[in-house]
Amino acid sequence: MAFRLRWSRQSPRTAVAIRCIGHTPEVDQLADDLRHAFPDAPILYISDQRSRARKWPAGRDVLPITRKKLDDLGLFHARENVGWKCGDYCYYVALEREWEYLWLVEPDVAFVNGASDILVKADTSTADLIGTRIGQRNPSWPWAERLAKASDFAEIRAVFFPLTRVSRRLAVSLLEARRVISARLAADDTLRVPNDESVVATVALESGASTLDLKAEHPEVFDLWTWGVKFWRPDVEAQGRPLIAHPVYSREEFVER
């Protein structure tokens, strides 16, 4: 399956994608937040439907991830939970649509008290990769060994994955790299699947792609930006200042898990 490398000027410069499984209140809340920031950008719903088809309201641009689609793309999915580990697969499915830059956001990201304005400013950048915590990790980071064994990269990097933006050029390069990795995984069942954070940052930085780290630029806005503690959205909003937070839930029962 081949994709257009260059963006057509008749198409939107920026598209926004939500990484999700099905239609939930959290997905709708995030779509509203992103529509505020990008009122003219198409919103794509990249829905993991490997296990079963999902119902969506009419009028949504839903791009399903199915086993057949991953096979057509040449992407490995035979073992381990690639839906969790390989969020970058969403980029490659989104290549079906026209865009020059794609924001990919997870539904447990919240933009409160005007924080989405930071995305508007960042979107004027021509950086190939925008994200947070871009760069090296501690040598004991477990995902580094996975990618090192499944590729020829000498130095493994990372980017925190709940919020990223990639250029179309980088997305195509990432797809090519994932196909090489996928072939190796298929040929050797002792290899483990590398995750999105390691693959995206390593390919970007090894290829000389330009980057922009939003957390380094706006540290105060990412005070509640982690992968462990869960935050309840009303508590985040009550801070009374712009915050981009993760992981955030709107229903209390999720916080209790």
Image (tube, rainbow, N blue to C red):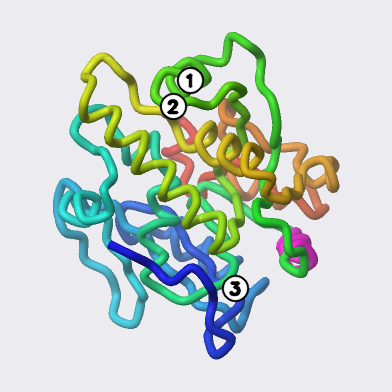
Q: Say whether residue 116 is magenta.
A: yes
In the image, residue 124 above or below residue 190 = below
- The residue sitting at 39% across, 65% down in the picture is 45
* Residue located beneath label 3 in the image: 14
- The residue sitting at 34% across, 82% down in the picture is 59
For numbered disc 2, what is the local secondary structure? Answer: loop
Tell me the amino acid under the disc marked 2.
Ser
For numbered disc 3, what is the local secondary structure? Answer: strand
Q: CA distance from mark 1 to mark 3?
A: 33 Å
Q: Are marks 1 and 2 in contact (CB under 8 Å)?
A: yes
243 with respect to 105 (left or right): right
Magenta part of the chain: 114-122
Which of the two residues, 42 or 109, is positioned nearer the viewer here? 42
* Residue located beneath label 1 in the image: 148
- For the C terminus, which image quadrant? top left
Q: Residues within 10 Å of mark 3 (few under 14, many from 20)?
A: many
Q: Residues within 10 Å of mark 1 (few under 14, many from 20)?
A: some
Q: Earlier in the sequence, mark 1 or mark 3?
A: 3
Which of the two residues, 198 or 181, is positioned nearer the viewer here? 181
From the top left corner, tell me how far across and down residue 44 is, in percent: 43, 69
* Residue located beneath label 2 in the image: 151
Q: Residues within 10 Å of mark 2 (few under 14, many from 20)?
A: some
Q: Quadrant of residue 226?
A: top right
In the image, residue 30 above or below residue 133 = below
Query: What secondary structure prevails in the magenta region?
Result: helix
In the image, residue 63 above or below residue 67 = below
Tell me the amino acid under the disc marked 1.
Ala
227 with respect to 80 (left or right): right
